[in-house]
Image (cartoon, grey):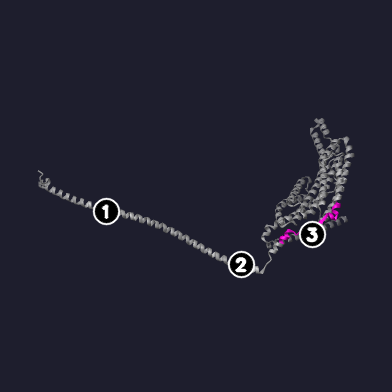
């Protein structure tokens, strides 16, 4: 009880120390972020339009590499699970391989961005959008792992898409012959070899388990063992011919994994020393990587073939159970058809070997055994090659592009007193000229307004003149008509006077006639000679 209390106190003390350490780190991070916020107003505007995104892209690639390495480390598992091999165990091995490849490609981008030209550095700023999406998905995977809801078989497709996306970006934007990335490319190839060996071993352990005892207890029924899949007469042959071959391949894969780990350690030493392998070493590594890929494909496909036997057997058993007691004969036939013979097993494995290695297996897993032995030899030769000082060369360390751009920016800000004085004088002259120009513009605007007013007034006077001319023309026409009318009036007046005189005469004559008539003197009326 006392020892338990001591252990509990020790655990609490360590927890407090870790909590204090985390708080101090958080304080440092907050202070750094606040200091950066204070620096931002002093930076020029064009920095946020150009260099800012490129630097954020570089840091984003660094975070991608770190987060994928964290995931890979947390998913580390024993070489062979105590509870039996399962699909999650095999998928986890592939996930760790893909995460290592993903981290290597992210570091490849970091190395290239740290040594490329200024134009390439600014051009690759456009990758920030792609890295942000990949980082969000990695954050989601880390949250799932933190909640202990990580299912390797469900997450594997997402990891494959992430690795394929980053591989496509690397092929599109990073030249293959870039000298600055030669060491990292070697490191990526060696990492694939080391984690490819893990995939081989996981699948081979699963194959061995399937052939000996069937799937793990938590991934299948207790009765779904090799006795329910393989013909009873052939189980002994499988145990004596196939299982030892699988064990031999496993031993060879373990040896190749040990050599790959040594090769990986040597590669990291070269990368830390700034040394890159020459073309011969890269060619050898490419050949070794191809052999490793063949073994991985062979082990995966062989495991899938054998696993399908158990899946078909389970489905046949389920069909027999659904058939009921009335169909016992048909259920028995279905169960018999679900059994697999040794010849079929050998034929299927040989077919896989033909597809992968291009040759038929004389014995089960014979070509895989030879390939694993050859892979170990090639890895030993590759390790000896890159350990030779003549096979490696020192890489040239180039200045980071953002340092170059910062130096250019600082050089452009070198102040000269005479130039500054002239600049101030010119600025004052420009201000004076601008003031005069504004006054001149104002005067021109006033003249323009006056001109418009005069033009409007001229137009009005022109219209009034036209109206006066029209009135004068009408007046002259009226005067001519007046003269005509006056002459006509005078003529009419003369005629009227004549008519008035004649009328007066007629009135006098009429009055005289009336008088004569009254007097009876008609002679005056008849006139002389009227008789």
Kind of element beneath mark 3? helix
- Sequence order check, earlier mark of 3 and 2: 3
Numbered circle sitting on residue 426: 2
Question: Can residue 234 be seen in this snapshot?
Answer: yes
* Chain part drawn in magenta: 383-406
Name the spot of residue 101 as percent of width and height, x first.
78, 50
Numbered circle sitting on residue 316: none
Q: Residue at x 18, y 50 (%)?
A: 502
Name the spot of residue 194 as percent of width and height, x first.
83, 49
Q: Which residue is mark 3?
A: 21
Name the spot of residue 65 as percent of width and height, x first.
77, 53
Pointers 3 and 2 in contact (CB under 8 A)? no
Q: Residue at x 72, y 59 (%)?
A: 402
Q: Which residue is mark 1?
A: 487
Query: Would you call the spot at circle 3 few (<14 residues within 10 Å), some (14-19), or many (20 or more)?
Result: few
When the figure is inspected, residue 86 is found, relative to residue 434, above or below; the finding is above
Name the spot of residue 512 as percent of width and height, x first.
13, 49
- Sequence order check, earlier mark of 3 and 1: 3
- Sequence order check, earlier mark of 1 and 2: 2
Q: Nearer the viewer, residue 111 or 17?
A: 111
Kind of element beneath mark 1? helix
């Amino acid at each position: 009880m006392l020892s338990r209390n001591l252990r509990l106190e020790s655990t609490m003390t360590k927890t407090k120390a870790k909590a204090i350490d985390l708080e101090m780190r958080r304080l440092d991070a907050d202070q750094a972020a606040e200091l950066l916020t204070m620096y931002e107003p002093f930076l020029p505007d064009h920095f946020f339009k150009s260099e800012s995104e490129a630097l954020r892209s570089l840091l984003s690639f660094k975070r991608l590499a770190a987060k994928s390495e964290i995931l890979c480390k947390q998913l580390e598992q024993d070489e062979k699970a105590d509870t039996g091999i399962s699909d999650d165990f095999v998928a986890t091995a592939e996930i760790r391989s893909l995460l290592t490849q993903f981290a290597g490609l992210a570091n490849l981008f970091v190395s290239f961005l740290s040594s490329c030209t200024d134009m390439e550095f600014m051009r690759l700023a456009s990758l920030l959008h792609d890295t942000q999406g990949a980082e969000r998905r990695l954050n989601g995977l880390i949250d799932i792992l933190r909640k202990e809801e990580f299912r390797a078989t469900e997450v594997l497709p997402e990891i494959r898409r992430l690795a394929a996306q980053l591989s496509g970006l690397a092929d599109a934007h990073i030249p293959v012959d870039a000298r600055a990335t030669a060491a990292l490319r070697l490191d990526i190839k060696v990492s694939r070899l080391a984690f490819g060996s893990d995939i081989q071993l996981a699948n081979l352990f699963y194959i061995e388990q399937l052939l000996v005892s069937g799937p793990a207890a938590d991934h299948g029924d207790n009765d779904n063992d090799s006795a329910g899949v393989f013909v009873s007469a052939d189980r002994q042959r499988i145990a004596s011919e196939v299982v030892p071959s699988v064990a031999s391949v496993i031993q060879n894969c373990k040896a190749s994994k040990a050599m790959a780990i040594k090769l990986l350690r040597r590669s990291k030493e070269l990368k830390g020393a700034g040394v890159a392998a020459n073309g011969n070493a890269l060619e050898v590594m490419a050949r070794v990587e191809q052999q490793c890929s063949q073994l991985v494909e062979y082990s995966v496909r062989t495991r899938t073939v054998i696993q399908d036997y158990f899946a078909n057997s389970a489905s046949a058993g389920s069909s027999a159970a659904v058939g009921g007691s009335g169909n016992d004969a048909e259920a028995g036939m279905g169960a018999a058809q679900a059994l697999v013979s040794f010849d079929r097993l050998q034929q299927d494995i040989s077919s896989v070997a033909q597809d992968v290695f291009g040759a038929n297996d004389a014995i089960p897993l014979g070509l895989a055994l030879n390939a694993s032995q050859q892979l170990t030899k090639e890895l030993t030769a590759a390790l000896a090659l890159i350990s030779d000082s003549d096979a490696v060369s020192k890489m040239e360390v180039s200045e980071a592009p953002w340092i170059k751009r910062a130096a250019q920016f600082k050089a452009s800000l070198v102040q000269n007193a005479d130039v500054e004085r002239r600049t101030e004088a010119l600025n004052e002259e420009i201000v004076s000229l601008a003031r005069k120009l504004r006054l001149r513009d104002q005067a021109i605007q006033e003249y323009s307004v006056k001109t418009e007013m005069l033009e409007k007034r001229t137009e009005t006077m022109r219209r009034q003149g036209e109206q006066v001319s029209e009135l004068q023309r009408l007046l002259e026409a009226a005067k001519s008509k007046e003269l005509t009318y006056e002459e006509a009036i005078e003529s009419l007046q003369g005629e009227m006077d004549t008519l008035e005189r004649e009328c007066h005469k007629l009135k006098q004559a009429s009055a005289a006639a009336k008088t004569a008539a009254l007097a009876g003197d008609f002679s005056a009326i008849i006139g002389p000679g009227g008789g």
